[in-house]
Amino acid sequence: DARVTQTPRHKVTEMGQEVTMRCQPILGHNTVFWYRQTMMQGLELLAYFRNRAPLDDSGMPKDRFSAEMPDATLATLKIQPSEPRDSAVYFCASGFGTGFGSEAFFGQGTRLTVV
Amino acid sequence: TQLLEQSPQFLSIQEGENLTVYCNSSSVFSSLQWYRQEPGEGPVLLVTVVTGGEVKKLKRLTFQFGDARKDSSLHITAAQPGDTGLYLCAGPTQGGSEKLVFGKGTKLTVNP
């Protein structure tokens, strides 16, 4: 049963600490997305990659957030330093990126709490 | 900026009732997708509508894309507790068809 795997599922950290979230996309998918979900803003796209190359990170606060794909089986989202306003659920999704109507398969998310 | 407005924001109904939720925009979308998200899980795609006026059925769920491709609706017949969840609509942004913009969702609760 192919699925997107995210770790950790939950993370509580103190303000100022570094946070790294990891994602294993579905094997064979060439597009990986990072989303953030909050009650106020809903789902927001932070960044996405195609064939491991970053295509768009305009939704990401670049002074503290960074996203990378070291290889085809791993995507990372890092926050340094973390702030309370970063508290949210972070989702990774992967897909084939073939154009409109492409399905995005989401992981279960990482619930981040910054205190 | 393309925005998708969903209504109602919350909906609580009894098992067996029918309901309709809406997804509206002032922008034209090449397609719209509907996802369902259960607590503690990521969204799962239900359907993609592509053609203006298109109607798609998925068991008790009926999805319609507006003629002008600016809106969509989801109708559920004889709702069941298993339909409980957050229903999200999403559409590709003008900047790139892989980039999706999501509505904030309708949180549906079906009481037994």
Image (cartoon, coloured by chain):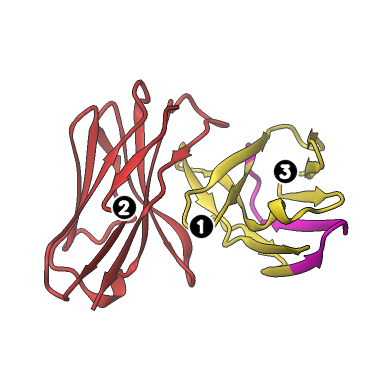
Instruction: Give the residue at mark 1.
Output: B1
The answer to whether residue A111 is left or right of residue A61 is: right
Q: Nearer the viewer, mark 1 or mark 2?
A: 2
Identify the hue of chain B: yellow
- Which residue is at 48% across, 51% downward? B41
In this orientation, does residue B67 appear? no
Mark 2 and mark 1 in contact (Cβ < 8 Å)? no
In the image shown, does A101 or A83 lie closer to the viewer? Answer: A83
Figure check: B11 above or below A97: below
- The chain letter for the residue carrying disc 3 is B
Write down the quadrant of residue A88 in the picture: bottom left
The answer to whether residue A104 is left or right of residue B28 is: left
In the image shown, does A69 or B13 lie closer to the viewer? Answer: B13
Image: magenta residue range: B12-32
The x, y position of residue B28, in whole percent, is 66, 46
- The chain letter for the residue carrying disc 2 is A
The x, y position of residue B62, in whole percent, is 81, 42
- Tags 3 and 1 on a common chain: yes
Which tag, 3 or 1, sits closer to the chain's start?
Answer: 1
Q: Quadrant of the N terminus of chain A?
A: top left
Figure check: B41 above or below B95: below
Amino acid bearing label 2: Ser
How crowded is the residue under tag 2: few (<14 C-alpha within 10 Å), some, or many (20+)? Answer: few
- Which residue is at 58% across, 39% downward? B45
Mark 1 and mark 3 in contact (Cβ < 8 Å)? no
Instruction: Give the residue at mark 3.
Output: B69
How crowded is the residue under tag 1: few (<14 C-alpha within 10 Å), some, or many (20+)? Answer: few
Q: Quadrant of the C terminus of chain A?
A: bottom left
Report how far apart the C-alphas of labels 1 and 2 lie in the structure: 13 Å
Identify the hue of chain A: red
Q: Residue furthest front?
A: B112
Amino acid bearing label 1: Thr
